[in-house]
Image (cartoon, rainbow, N blue to C red):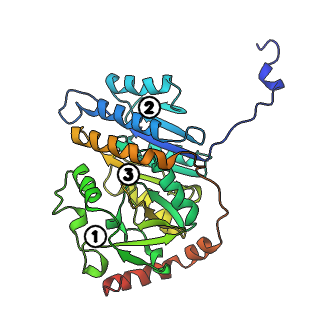
Amino acid sequence: MRIGTNPEKNRESKLIHKPHRIIMPFWIPNVEDDYFKNQPEVLRLCLQSLTESIDIERTNITLINNNSCREASLIAEEFVNKGLIDKYVVRSENRGKLENILAEARASYEDYITISDADFLFLKGWEKAVSDIMMNFPKAGMVSCYPAAHLAYFYNSNIILLRLKSKKIISDEEINLFENGHGHSVDTGLYSRKGLQKRYSWRERHYYIKKNNVIAILGAVHALATFRKEVVQGFNANSVDFVFKNGYEHEFIDFSTEKNGYIRLSTPKLFAYHLGNTIPKDILSIFENKNKEYEMQSQNYKLWQSKKLKKFTKIYSFFFPIVNILFRVLRKFKII
C-alpha cells in the first residue's frame, strides 16, 4: 500500500540532453588466457584516454560490461564511481558486441552517436576533428577519427555524386601506426593494396573533399565511428541471432549510411591507436607527444553544433539503386 505522495510529482526537473553519446561495449572473460591477460589494462588506458579527451559538457558515455571478469569489471567501476560514465550496463551473459550497441544506439536521443571498441587509445582533439567534418559536410553520415582511405569504396557509392579530389593526404607515419595497430606489415598491409583506378596504392593517393579549410578523407571504419542520428535510425531493425558472425556489422550497420543518402568519411589525421591486446611502450610515448600538440588546438571550441540538413539526402536515398549500379560500373572500368 502506498502512503503519501511521491515528492517528485511536485517538481518539474528538466532533463538535459547532450548532443553526443559514445557507446562502448567490452568483453574480457578472464585474465588466465594469454590473449586476454593484458586486456584489463588496455581497457583502463582506453577509458582514461577517452574520458580525458572529450568535452564532458556535451558528451555522455554508455559503457557496456558484457559479462566480463572481476578484474575488468573493477576497472570499469572505477570510472563509473568517478562520475565519468553516464550509463553503465552490466549483462549477465555475453550477448556479443552487435546486439548491445544496436540496443543502446536505437534508444539514444543524441544527434551524434559514436560506436567504439574498447581497445583504442584516444588522442585529445578527436572530437573536434570529427565535429568539424560533421558541421562542414552535411553529406557526412558516418565519420571515423581513424583514417580509413582504403575503405573509400566500401558501402560508399554516393561518392560518385561528389567532386572528388585525390592526392596523398595521410602521412606515412600515421599509416604505419594504423598498420601496426592491426598487426600488419607496413609494406603489405591494407594501405599497400591497389586503390584509385587500380593504378595507385592507398598509401600513395587518397580521395578527399575540402571545405572551409576542413579536409575529409573518403572512407570510414565501423570499429570506431560517429554517426548522425538519421543514419542510426536506419540501422537494420531485425533481432541479432548470433553472439558473433563474420559480416554481421555489414548487415546491420554498414549499409545504412549509403542507403540513406549519406557518405562515409574519416579525419586526415590519426586520432586513435588500436591497442588490441598489447600495450607497446613506444606508442604511449608517441601519443603523449601528440597529445601536447593537439590539446591546444581543441580548447575553447564549441562541439557538435546542430545544423539543419538539406533535402539532398532524401533525393540520394531515392536514387540509391541507380547510383549503386552506376558506381559499380565506374569501378569495373577503373574510372574511379
Which dot, 1 or 2, sits closer to the camera? 1
For the residue carrying disc 3, how many other residues have a C-alpha within 10 Å: few (<14), some (14-19), or many (20+)? some
Instruction: Say if residue 237 shows up in the picture.
Output: no
**What's the CA distance linking mark 1 and mark 2?**
40 Å
- Residue 234, given in percent of the width and then of the height, sits at 55, 60
Q: Which part of the image, by quadrant, shows the N terminus?
A: top right
Mark linked to residue 241: none
Badge 1: residue crowd in 10 Å (few <14, some 14–19, many ≥20): many
Mark 1 falls on what kind of element?
A: loop
Nearest the eye: 111 or 320:
111
**In the image, 296: left or right of 202?**
right
Residue 283: where, in percent of width, then height?
26, 43
Checking the image for residue 91, the label placed there is 2
Q: Which mark is residue 202?
A: 1
Instruction: Please name the residue that numbered disc 3 is placed on.
Output: 223
Mark 2, residues whose alpha carbon is within 10 Å: few (<14), some, or many (≥20)?
A: few
Q: Nearer the viewer, residue 145 or 263?
A: 145
- Compared with residue 37, is residue 334 higher up or lower down, i.e. above or below? below
Mark 1 or mark 2: name the one nearer the start of the chain.
2
Measured as percent of width and height from the top left, residue 126 is found at: 45, 50
Q: Disc 2 marks which amino acid?
A: Arg
| Dots 1, 3 in contact, CB < 8 A | no
Write the residue at 58% across / 55% down. Answer: 229
Rendering quarter of residue 174: bottom left
The type of residue carrying mark 3 is: Ala
Give the alpha-carbon distance from disc 3 to disc 2, as whole Å: 21 Å
Q: Secondary structure at mark 2?
A: loop
Q: Earlier in the sequence, mark 1 or mark 3?
A: 1
The quarter of the picture where residue 168 lies is bottom left
Q: The residue under label 1 is which amino acid type?
A: Trp
**Which residue is more in the foreground, 27 or 190?**
190
Q: Residue at x 35, y 43 (%)?
A: 120
